[in-house]
Image (tube, coloured by chain):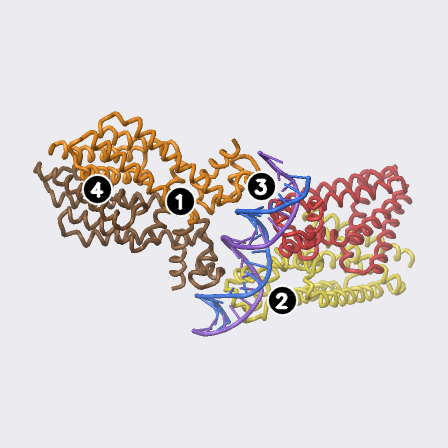
Chain colours: A brown, B orange, C yellow, D red, E blue, F purple
Amino acid sequence: MTRDKILEAAINQYSLFNYHGATMRKIAEEVDIKPASIYFFFKNKEELFVAAFQMLLEKHLLEMKKVLNEARDKSILEIFHSLLIGTIDYHKKNMHETNAYISLITSPPSEINRFLQEHMKNFDYWLIDSLTDLIKRDKPSISNREASTITKQFLLLMDGVFWEINLYDEEELCEQIYHALHIIAILLGGYEHEK
Amino acid sequence: MTRDKILEAAINQYSLFNYHGATMRKIAEEVDIKPASIYFFFKNKEELFVAAFQMLLEKHLLEMKKVLNEARDKSILEIFHSLLIGTIDYHKKNMHETNAYISLITSPPSEINRFLQEHMKNFDYWLIDSLTDLIKRDKPSISNREASTITKQFLLLMDGVFWEINLYDEEELCEQIYHALHIIAILLGGYEHEK
Amino acid sequence: MTRDKILEAAINQYSLFNYHGATMRKIAEEVDIKPASIYFFFKNKEELFVAAFQMLLEKHLLEMKKVLNEARDKSILEIFHSLLIGTIDYHKKNMHETNAYISLITSPPSEINRFLQEHMKNFDYWLIDSLTDLIKRDKPSISNREASTITKQFLLLMDGVFWEINLYDEEELCEQIYHALHIIAILLGGYEHEK
Amino acid sequence: MTRDKILEAAINQYSLFNYHGATMRKIAEEVDIKPASIYFFFKNKEELFVAAFQMLLEKHLLEMKKVLNEARDKSILEIFHSLLIGTIDYHKKNMHETNAYISLITSPPSEINRFLQEHMKNFDYWLIDSLTDLIKRDKPSISNREASTITKQFLLLMDGVFWEINLYDEEELCEQIYHALHIIAILLGGYEHEK
DNA sequence: TATGAATGAGCGTTCATTCAT
DNA sequence: GATGAATGAACGCTCATTCAT
């Protein structure tokens, strides 16, 4: 109970002030306990944050899996659509976590760098594999190579949208999502044509 | 100039440890002076960083302008190409600055938030305006709306590549740039066809 | 008994880190319980250590009495010999306790100072009285004054050897014990002669 | 200036409360500065105490050398006398330092153990060599072995007196010194006789 | 008996900052 | 221009201790 609240507060503070600015005092304040109490649950600041980041990344992975699973039976274009919207929705709903996630990737505290690299690689492999499979299921005539290319192109667009969360407001972001989907439609259309 | 060296060191430290982790002592150490000496040039930490960030953003804007200028006389596809390659090249060559830039955008120290928003908006306007103009110069038949759409789609792809600087190594990044250019070609091709 | 194990651990920790460095946590760890459990047996740190020191001093006194008792029927020179060897043996076998004992005497936690002074005085009186008696039993011709002198000289030598436990290794210490016994023999021999 | 006062205060506090009880705050208070200021002169607590102990041991060695030097031209018995009195006098006059010295030897903070061992060995060698030389100068007929034996016997007595600083008050201590000198006289007398 | 959970006080240390020189 | 010396505030953390269970 308290342990979970501490983890959550750690992520919040990290998203606002990064590692060095996220002090044990402020985390404790957010949970409404005293700083010393944190040390009953975590050995020190570093281990608290390793635990918090682990939780963050797992949650992110789980959420993505859920989104993909719920869209699994739709057409590939709709799957891309759901994935994009799902990602943005999740991140808009959990701005603190998203901010923390972004900070984590752009300037990871050196202690957890290796662990982070591992996670990112796994996440990437899983997403690429899943999407490539779904593309081939939807368009059986497509070659492995082509499916992989489409996947990577989609990731490129998704990453673009993801980065633009930082730059644009709700409305502009919506427009960019629309552009992304439009491009995907064109790319998939190309293969449609050739079939 | 000692002052310039301090600014540079501030950016370096910021890129490595963010605002709260970039201490006056470490900055001074990097310049090989004592912390007290920094206060001869800057009133306090906040003003030092405001100055450093200003320099960083100006440099970034200047660099982008230079890249665009040098490509100005090529075809629009080549311009897009140059812009993408130029951006990546610049950021690969100045990893500290890029890291600082990313950190600045993803988790800006609250004091400079307003100033940063202003800059980003101006940068965006400038880039969109410039690109829209160049598109229309290259393809006079295109409507304002269409030109604006292409520009935004290009920005989406460029942002995707930019974010992937964080995720991928040299080789993979190269592949993604290729995908981006390929997509751009298709999008422009569409208009070509309609002409 | 948990209580006894706590006392023992307290002495151990005290011998290693003195009063302020002997923490409740480390003591608890040594007994394989939690720090809170110590408070079931002792009101607080101070009372725990008062109890521990009392035990330590009593044990030391008892041991000395035992050594003296076992040598009681030998000649006075042999008694001195046994006492010296016995003391060293005991302290070599219980290095932690000896260390604690030495620390206790050289830098007593202020709270138990008075209690310690009392004990030391009693121990001293007892040892001097016992030895003086035994000398007179062995050499009836000796005056009270002379017997007292010999006792004090012996104590001086024993204290020398005791301090050198801190300074020398096994072999060198053995040599010093030999010197001590040699001197004692000479001193007693002087009276022998005069008899 | 300030640096020296800090070292002195460190020794004082150490003599009273040992390493763990000698806090930076109390040391700073004694010097009438703020705790943070200590860190301008010393990297951390450990290095402060290493410096303090080094100073302590050097001062002790110097003092002993001075005492020995001043007595150099007297007879060997008088030299022993001066040494004993000089040692006691010095330690009585610098009770804090003596207490620190004793604590240092009986329960050295593990970090400086090696350095301390080295010093003690050197001090011992120096004292033994010096005394052996002086004995032979005073009694040329004596063999090396005999001189060495006398030296070690003297050290034994001096150590006894030294330890008894902890146990006895002024008056009793005086008596013990008298006993020590008496024994030395007898021991030297033995060789006199044999000559 | 024993401990999980909590805390106030204090620890060693570093922070940004000042100011006389 | 630059720094030696200092400091108030805050840092991460550990201390002895409490108390309900």
Q: Residues within 10 Å of mark 1 (few under 14, many from 20)?
A: few
Separation of marks 1 and 2 at Cα, in angstroms = 59 Å
> Same chain for marks 4 and 2?
no
Q: Residues within 10 Å of mark 4 (few under 14, many from 20)?
A: many
Above or below residue C110? Residue D142 is: above
> Same chain for marks 1 and 2?
no
Mark 1 or 3, closer to the camera: 1
**Amino acid bearing label 1:** Phe
**Amino acid bearing label 2:** Glu
Separation of marks 3 and 2 at Cα, in angstroms = 47 Å
Separation of marks 4 and 1 at Cα, in angstroms = 34 Å
> Same chain for marks 4 and 1?
no
Above or below residue C80? Residue A149 is: above
Tell me, for residue B115, which label it has, or none: 1
| Position in image of residue D189 (x %, y %) | 89, 47
| Position in image of residue D86 (x %, y %) | 83, 48
**Amino acid bearing label 3:** Ala
Q: Chain of mark 2?
A: C
**Amino acid bearing label 4:** Phe
> Same chain for marks 1 and 3?
yes
Q: Is residue C25 left or right of residue B121?
A: right
Q: Is residue B103 left or right of residue B78?
A: right
What residue is pinned by disc 2?
C46
Looking at the picture, tell me which residue is in the foreground, C162 or A83. Answer: A83
